[in-house]
Image (spheres, helix red, strand yellow):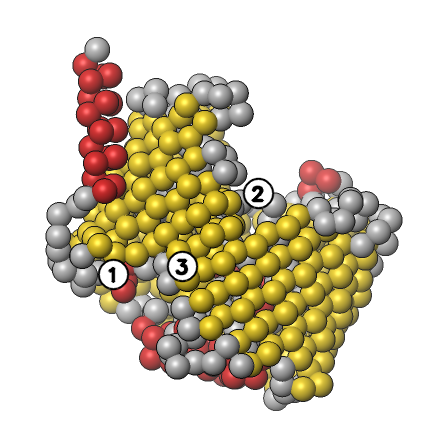
Amino acid sequence: MRRKIVGKVFLSFAAFAAFFVCSGPSAVAEDYQRLNINSLSREELLALEMLTPFQVESILEYRSKYGDILSSSELMAIDGFVEENVEALAAVLLFEPSPPSEGRRTRQVITARVKKPFAKDGFATTAKYCLTSGKIGVGAVIDNDPGEKFPDFVSAFASFKGFVAGDFRARFGQGLAVWKGMSFNSLGEPSALAGRESGITPYTSSDEENYLRGVGWSGKVGATSLNAFASVKGKSGAVNASRVFGRWKIGSTAVCGVDKYGHLWANGGVDFYGSAGHLRCFGELATNERLAPAVKLGALWRPVYELEAGWKGWIYAPAYTAPQGASSLKDQIGTEAAVRYTFKRWKFNANVQCRWKPSSAQWSFKYRIAAQYDFAEGSSLAYHFRNGQHRFNFKWAAGPWSFGCRAEGNLSGYGFFGEASYREPRLEVTARITYYDTDGWNSRIYLYERNLPQSFSTMAYYGKGTGAYLVVKYAPVRWCELWFKLQQNYCSFFTRITIPG
């Protein structure tokens, strides 16, 4: 009886706090909000303390030539970035069109991608349109998989100031109650341990699951930041509110809905994020309609620029469920720690993660150790040891040319590739050849492959054989890009047209 009373009081408090939280200044807002990589200046990129000066200059040069960076995989095409950098940045940055200023003219971006798998009939197609003008935005996505009736997926949105109608994402707190959008990364940079909420934002992806459809709003009432939505996808509605007290942000979320069986469900959560000296702390406490608890706590410590360490732990009761929360929020106890240290041109990373499932007594253990040395002009040498898998990666740059190779393997198999790229303002060409030899599927090797914009590709190689691909980008004029990729399993084409006002 006492447990039910406490749970009801907590749910009531979460719902009430979602509408009203006491006032306070906004000193931590800039540190907390997920930032758009396309809106940041040179000084703001350096202030992130996650990028080297070379990487910052590469981003600025790329944006000046080709426009906004619209996906984390597109960041891989920029000099100075490897897969691990992108994984960490994807957890703390947005890859969205840069918002126009009040006096900025209308801007339209049209993209289209066609992919032909050689082993399947039909084509995979994706087309996107986005218009921004002042505080107005309109966008649409059409996507189709091979062999399915066209169109397989249609998404659209219209936004004005903080209002969004159509498809959108919602990410509040640490994701225990509401988190529709990019999920958390594991075994990345220490800063990736903390979830970075972004409120309500338009949905521009072709993923057919991880979004909401309805109406949403993000804004402020006085000093209180508010988010609210009503979604027909998932039949749910939520309210989130937060205020800042000095260097601490306190928020609360209340969400409820009806499942496919007509049963009512609800979640409530209270979250915090703030700093004290060199320490940044974050966490969330939540429960559901069955009064099952879930908690996540963590801290990031950065006493000097060269050193950063982080930890988080979580407990999700077996009966806790969150239909609009982040994935895997059920029947789990876990902890993860990460540390990063840089010394001149050296960079060291170490991660460890342990999870336990109480109901079945199953547990998993993951780890990563990495070291990287950055030479001048973007060349680098790196070693990674992750879950029993060794990886050596080398990249060398000389003017418009860059060459890279990677060897990766374990006791049951290995894979190796060599890659060469040529880049000039209008033309980019990348070619790779891969050789692999493993015992079978259970000893498969995953290798990241350069792909077209708005695409991400990690191939699983098993057995014995070779692979190759060619990626070509040509920009005949500043406002038009043409991309082509030929690989042993498919070929694909991508075009992006930017129409200024």
319 to 315, vertically: above or below: above
Q: Which residue is nearer to you in this view: 484 or 401?
A: 484
Mark 3 burial class by Cα count in 10 Å: few <14, some 14-19, many 20+: many
- From the viewer's perspective, tell me whether residue 149 is left or right of residue 29: right
Type of residue at label 2? Glu
Q: Which residue is mark 2?
A: 209
Query: Considering only order in the chain, which callout, 1 or 3, is on the residue closer to the N terminus?
Result: 1
Q: Residue at x 21, y 36 (%)?
A: 16
467 to 473, vertically: above or below: above
Q: Which residue is nearer to you in this view: 231 or 25?
A: 231
Q: Which residue is mark 3?
A: 92
> Disc 3 versus disc 1: distance between alpha carbons?
14 Å
Type of residue at label 1? Ala
Mark 2 burial class by Cα count in 10 Å: few <14, some 14-19, many 20+: few
Could you tell me if residue 424 is visible in this image?
yes
- From the viewer's perspective, tell me whether residue 130 is left or right of residue 359: right
Considering the numbered disc 3 on the image, is that residue within a helix, a strand or a loop?
loop
Query: Considering only order in the chain, which callout, 2 or 1, is on the residue closer to the N terminus?
Result: 1
The N terminus sits in image quarter: top left
